[in-house]
Image (spheres, rainbow, N blue to C red):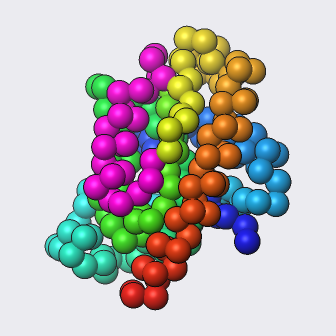
Amino acid sequence: MTTKVGIIIGSTRPGRNGEQVATWVRDVAAAHAGDAAEFEILDLLDFQLPLLDEPIPAVGAPGSNPHTLRWAERVGACDAFVFITPEYNAGPPAALQNAIDYLYREWTGKAVAYVGYGVYGAVTAVQELRAQAGRLRMADIGPQVALSLREDFADMTVFKPQELHVPEVHELVDELLAWSRALSPLRTEAAAAA
């Protein structure tokens, strides 16, 4: 069975670098995983999520607004995720946090990996996201890729990753897929209970 991995671009800021990074991650991951996985980019810009506008938190009830339902359908169809995140003021972007907060059950029982980019590879933003993953009952995997704006981008805007990051993506993908397969019974039970 093919694992469906959603690669979520976490920034909606004009001039963001996330699209370049997500495309590279998708291409490297797909070449490495072969038929074992399908990688799909989920760009938050395409979903146009306003600041959370559901009256009941997602842990209590699924959302009902059309934009929430569309987002929930796409996230719910994935077995695992790679969050592509920059770091703004030592944290993840507000757009990514907002998108996460819209949902609950669509995240649970799924593995998540992180590719950060920033002056220091967005390691602080990833730490915050890791803490939240546990509360969402996600399995956040150990390997992560930390891309430096100084060393992996020309003029901090044109993505030119160092070759050393390719084996890091391979390790990330291998562990993400292994965890996703291991969590499959949890996702099956949750789907049956829904």
State the extent of the magenta-drawn residues as a range.
Answer: 118-140
Q: Is residue 91 visible?
A: yes
Quadrant of the image containing the N terminus: bottom right
User: In the rendering, at what x and y percent does residue 4 appear?
Assistant: 64, 64
Q: Nearer the viewer, residue 125 or 66?
A: 125
Report the side of 55 relative to 20 (left or right).
left
Q: Is residue 27 above or below residue 181?
A: above
Q: Nearer the viewer, residue 95 or 162?
A: 162
Q: Nearer the viewer, residue 121 or 149?
A: 121
Residue at (50, 55) in percent of width and height: 111
User: In the rendering, at what x and y percent does residue 138 appear?
Assistant: 41, 57
User: In the rendering, at what x and y percent does residue 24 appear?
Assistant: 70, 37
Report the side of 93 relative to 39 (left or right).
left
Report the side of 143 relative to 93 (left or right).
right
Residue at (31, 26) in percent of width and height: 90
Q: Is residue 20 above or below residue 78?
A: above
